[in-house]
Structures are given as C-alpha cells and as structure tokens.
Image: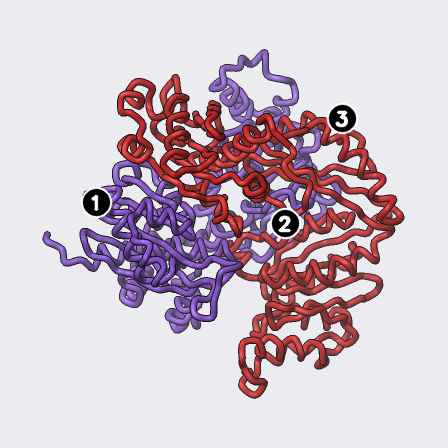
Chain colours: A red, B purple
Amino acid sequence: MTMTAELISVGTELLLGNIVNTNASYLAEQCARLGLSLYHQSVVGDNGKRLAGVLKEAAGRSDVVILTGGLGPTKDDLTKEVVAEFTGKALVEDTAARKVVEDFFHVRQIEPKDITENNWKQALVPEGAIVLKNPNGTAPGLIVVHENVHIILLPGPPGEMKPIFEASVFPYLQERSPGVIYSRMVKICGIGESKVETMIADLIEGQTNPTIATYAKTGEVDLRVTARAEDESQGKKLVKPMIRELKKRFGFYIFSTKEEETLEETLVTLLRDLGYSFAAAESCTGGLLTARLVNVPGVSEILKQSYVTYSNKAKHKTLGIPKVIIKKHGAVSEKVAAEMAKGAANSAGADVSIAVTGIAGPEGGTPEKPVGTVFIGCYVKGNVTVKEYHFDGNREKVRESSVVYAMTQLRECILSQPRVK
Amino acid sequence: MTMTAELISVGTELLLGNIVNTNASYLAEQCARLGLSLYHQSVVGDNGKRLAGVLKEAAGRSDVVILTGGLGPTKDDLTKEVVAEFTGKALVEDTAARKVVEDFFHVRQIEPKDITENNWKQALVPEGAIVLKNPNGTAPGLIVVHENVHIILLPGPPGEMKPIFEASVFPYLQERSPGVIYSRMVKICGIGESKVETMIADLIEGQTNPTIATYAKTGEVDLRVTARAEDESQGKKLVKPMIRELKKRFGFYIFSTKEEETLEETLVTLLRDLGYSFAAAESCTGGLLTARLVNVPGVSEILKQSYVTYSNKAKHKTLGIPKVIIKKHGAVSEKVAAEMAKGAANSAGADVSIAVTGIAGPEGGTPEKPVGTVFIGCYVKGNVTVKEYHFDGNREKVRESSVVYAMTQLRECILSQPRVK
C-alpha cells in the first residue's frame, strides 16, 4: 500500500544534452527515502502540448507527480500554465508568491517599481495551490491537488529546487505517506562496491522492512537502511539491529553514519581532534588529494603544506629524496612512496603526511607495474606505512581512487595507533 | 522534414537515484549533432510490463527509439525480450553475437567451456536484428527495424555504450538522416555564459540553418554550430561563415575548435610548444589547478613543481614571501598573489607560474573582500600580471571558477607577449 511517485523534468536544455539531469537522481533518492515507489521519469521540452500529454499520463498512474523546470519568467516557461489548464484552475495572483518576488529583489536592493514586468508573472499561481517559499529565486514551489493526485512544481536550477524540496516538499510528502519512513546512512570506504554487495547479499535477499539500498561512488559505498513504521520510535527500533549488524560486518571501514558527512570531513575532524598537522606529497594525483581536503571549511587549522612533485627532480629537490633511491627503485615504488611521506612531513614540519606515487596511464605501464599501480605512503609521528594498490579504469578514475584510498589509509594508520586516553 | 528520436533509459538504479543519467545527456547531444529532433526521454525500471508500455508509446510517435540498459546476462535484464515481443520477433542465437561473448572472454584468457551458462544469453538476438560489436562487454548493441521505426538497443554502462554509439550507431543514423549534418565546436573560456549568450543573441534569434547550441560548464562555454546540408562540402560552406563570425566576436577567448580538446590540453600544448616549464602556488584552490593540468597525459614535460600554500606560514616558508607583506596587504591581495607567482617560479626554477589566493567561503569574507574574491597572479619570464575576480556560488564553485580563469589568464599573458618568430 505504498504511494507511487513520478518525475517530469521540463526543459529543452535537457533534450539537447546541454546539461545532465542531476535533479532526477536527487529527487529519485528523496523518493526512496520517503518510501515512495518511483516507476517512471520523463524529460520533455518547453512545449505546451507535449508537456500536457506527459502530465496527463503521469497523473493517470501515480499518486504524486513532481515537475521540475519551466517556472521562469519568460514566455518559454509553461509548466504552471499547463498544470493550471490540466487541473481546470485559473491563474490568480497570490500574495505569498508576490512576496517571494519582492523579497528576492529586496535583498538585492531593487525596489518594487524597478522590477521588470515579466517578473510579476511569478506571482501568478493556479487557484488554491499551496505556495512554497523559494529563498534563492523568484519562482515559488507549488503544490496543486487534483483528483487525489499531488502535483508538485519546482524550479529547475538545483540550487533553488533542493532547498524548497528539503524545507517544504519532504515534510508534505512524509505527512501523507502511510506511516513514517525512518532511514539511516552507513558510509563505507576502502572496500569495493562488489565486495560490499557480496558481504550484504544475505541481508538484501528477501529484505522487506527495513531495506538496504547501495549508492556507490569512487572508492566509497553508502548504504541507506530504510524502515517503514507507524512512528519514529518504531522506525528506529526496526533500523537499529540492521545498523548494528552492518557495524559488525564492516567495522572500521565505516567512516560515518551521518547523512551529509564526507570522508574528507571525517579525516579533517580526526586530525583536528588529535591536534595533528598535515602535509602531502602528490605525484600522480597532482594536487587532487589536497584539493579534496581543502573542500572542508576550516582545514587551515591542520593543513601545513602540500607539494605536487610530479617529476623526479622535484621529488629530489623539494622532498630531499636521494637521486640514487629513485634510480634504483623507480619513482613508482614502495621505497619512494615512503621517502616522499617522510620528506613531506619533514619539509612542512607536519605530524602526519600522505604520499602518492603511481601510474595513472594511459602511458607508462609495464608488465611489472601496469597502469593503475599506485603506492601510497602514510607518515604518522615517525611511523611510515606503505601499501600497493592496483586500480581499474582510465587516468581520471585511477587518480580519484588513489585519493579516496589515501584518505582511508591515513585514517586507518591513525586509528590503529596505540592511544593514550 | 527531420527525423524524430526518443530515449528510453532502463534501470532500477536510475529510479532509486543511485546513479546520475549521464547516458541521456550524451545521447541527447549526439542526436542534436545528427540533426534529429528529440522531444521525449524516459526512465523506466527493469520491469517487463512498464517497459513495454513506454516502448509502445515511444515507437508510436518517433522514428528512432534508443534504449540503454537492461541487456545484461541476469534474469532482471529484460530489454531485449521486451523488444522481441513488441516487434513479434523470436530470439535466436546469432553467430556475431556469440562471437562478441567469446571474444570478450578470450582476451581475458577464459576458455569457452569455462564461460558460465548465463553469459550465452547474450548471444540471443531478435531475428533479423543488426548486431553491433561491443569491444568492452558481452552485450552487443542491436538495431531492430519495425514498421519504419529504428529501435536501437545499447548496454547501460557508459564505457560500453559510447564506443558502440560512435562506431556503429552514429554512422547508421547519419546515413538515414535526410541529407548530412555537419557540425563544428567553438570553445570559449574567460567569458560568462550570459555574456556569451548576449553576444550571440542576434545570431540565435530566428536561426534556421546553421543553428548554434550553447553548452555551459564552469568558466567555459561551448558553442556547437550545426548545419543540415545535401553533402559534407555544402555543410562546410554553410558553417564556415558562422565560425568566422564567432571568431571575429570572441577572438582570443576561443581556446579550441576541436571537438574533444580541453582547456588544460590547449594550455599544456602551448607551454610545450614554447618550451616553457610550469609551476604553481595554490592557496584557496588547494591543488585543484595543478590536478587539472595533470589530467593531460605528458604533462611531465612541462610541470616542474606545485606548492599548496594554504597557510600564511607556508607562503612565507616555501615561497619566501616576507611576513611583513602578508601582514600589511593580507593573504588575499594583489601584492601577495604577485609574490606567490614569483616565489613559485623561483623555487621551482620554472619559466611560467600561476598563483591563486582567494576567499572561497563560506567563512572569511569581509565587506571589502567578500566571499568569492580571488586574486590570480601569472608569472611569464619575469613579468607578473595580477587580476582580481569576484566569483559567484559556493566554496566548490568559487574554487572551480578560479581554476578555469587562472588557466585562461596564463594563456592570455603568454599569447599577448611580444613574440619573435
């Protein structure tokens, strides 16, 4: 007895392939979180007749229809008009929608009299629609209920759509879903997707409530455990044993159980909590690892310095690795990775460091060290650990995997240290 | 009298939001290249009945239907079966398809006798289908013509789908399109999307043949000029004056007219051609700039060394910037950007360098230097140029924009040098 939902993305730019439809994957994941069954997604251009056709079909088979795009102030934007016509409602000016427009220009220090005429189109809504605040634009979100179908209109830009969905649409749908949906994230790094799937195959086989959905990124697998329940406390009760089971199976490889937390955030937090300063020496990753850490606001508290030492000369000159070592072992070797890690920590005066050296391809592979061979060295307060990896995929993929496994490895080295409490 | 095309993406993982549908944007762009009119895209799960419904509708309104996904060897994969049933064709074993399976395992040194049974499902095709080679997997592409509709089946993984499309589907559709489609890319950096659109508004207004489509990325706008013509030479003739006009309008800001060439490739090629070695000093970009350049295979010929000097201490210690200068001007300043550029070039012994220092946010902004303020310094053989930028968006966006504008600025500095031929 679940509710069914369906997505309609409106926009000629999607039909021309000018942009990737990230709204659809975001909304699909949100529907899964809400326990809605999503069977169809469509994309249609800014064309009244074709949009009306797609909408009619969607409303005929689903309980919830979410439309994104086509809410702008230009005459090409037709979503609202098509929905009004389909539901037989007139477009009327709405005070709340008018305020969305005024507020938007007010913060930008533009007076109502200076707002160009077409923007006031944004104040028109289908009669009786629920108007949802849009802090980041002039098009409010709208909900129109028609013959028991919830038709939800959201602006196309993700930066406007997502905040409206989170603040208004999610609670609206949650309230209408039968019972509540309770979900928890378990984020795993350092284990490949297929291995994770094998390790939980028995849990997924024949799962009913809770269910586990897997979301794989490069070097990371997120598991969402979702339960349908009568109330939140029952939901928690259903999810808890599964989380416990996953923790038992994946242990240390779980880096977070927080919805929004990234691997780099957990690493920066770990270093900050321990008062450890950080440095890196990057060869094949070319700065990508440090750039990932710099994603985290406040990283300045721990980041001493990083060196992109792509050439052998730079490895020698900047990190002080004797030329003879590079010559004897090769730049992509366990020995050089260890020396790079030590060199980076010494040069920067850091407590911990990561060094990455590898063959990202497409050239440079040998039978002994094929493309995808990467050595990662971690230095933690005088101790150096080096691991050898063999990553699949093209140059970009090898480099991305290197970054994730490097963070994972440093986390492991730090956590497995003997600690004095 | 154009042909209409439509896309159907098959896969439950798309409905759960586990992955983003990049296949759809790729195929949409290819359809635009081919001059096909694309009015609809759909996503449907691995469900026979619903897929059959979507297919029936698509085949009823479009000349070409492209399905991706659901061609795997498991019992969940149903696309081929649904198409066979819809077109009333039996599934029969095909020699070419069988060979695709054999070849795939042969390169992986697996004997036919050791191939598990389910893989041979891949050798079954709807009777009379055209079988398309798949060098990267066991599922061949298939084309079934039914009542004048070209139904094209492709595997879901982009790494398999794209090569089959390029090698087999593109020429197949091109041959069947009325006339030929000739298109050229014009890639622009250093000018914002809305400004580019304003600068070509008169060309786009009322355009018929050729047409211009814009594809905006961070800091880069690509324009595709497409002409429909009787033959290639007429196509070239139609496109040429438009390219000339665009070159006149955007001049130096056009960094490439090659389909696949990236901005970092043009920069690395430029440096290599001039025999210039490169270094960078990155603060807010945290290594992202150097990582972009390291995308280019063969970058080792020019890349001396990069420094991620996020803290003031690192700027002083590694790049030799006097503490008093940082204190007086602030780390985010014209002066410090200039000193960082000089320091990086000197420390690394490089001919040219880029330095980036800015406030990426969310913290750290002041009324004088709000979030998004970035100073970029370029050093070219003793000359330093610094520019101040104000970028929009969140931390990630500010850092991405900084990287693109930094490459653009260095390119400009080098190209505007007096040159001895």
Q: Nearer the viewer, residue B278 or A211?
A: B278
Judging from the image, mark 3 belongs to the subunit labelled A
- The residue type indicated by label 3 comes to Asp
Give me the disc on residue A293: none
Residue in the image at 57% along x and 29% along y: A412
For the residues tagged 3 and 1, is the chain the same? no
Residue in the image at 57% along x and 78% along y: A105
Local secondary structure at mark 2: helix
Q: Closer to the camera: disc 3 or disc 2? A: 3
The alpha-carbon separation of the residues under discs 1 and 2 comes to 44 Å
- Residue A98 image offset from top left, x and y in percent: 67, 79
The alpha-carbon separation of the residues under discs 3 and 1 comes to 58 Å
Residue under numbered circle 1? B276
The alpha-carbon separation of the residues under discs 3 and 2 comes to 27 Å
Tell me whether circle 3 and circle 1 mark residues in contact (CB < 8 Å).
no
Judging from the image, mark 1 belongs to the subunit labelled B
Q: Is residue A257 left or right of residue B104?
A: right
Residue in the image at 49% along x and 19% along y: B108
Local secondary structure at mark 3: helix
**Vertical side of B286 occupied by A79: above or below:** below
Local secondary structure at mark 1: loop
**Vertical side of B410 occupied by A69: above or below:** below
- The residue type indicated by label 2 comes to Ser
Q: Nearer the viewer, residue B215 or B373?
A: B373
Residue under numbered circle 3? A202
- The residue type indicated by label 1 comes to Tyr
- Residue B1 image offset from top left, x and y in percent: 50, 60
Give me the disc on residue A25: 2
Judging from the image, mark 2 belongs to the subunit labelled A
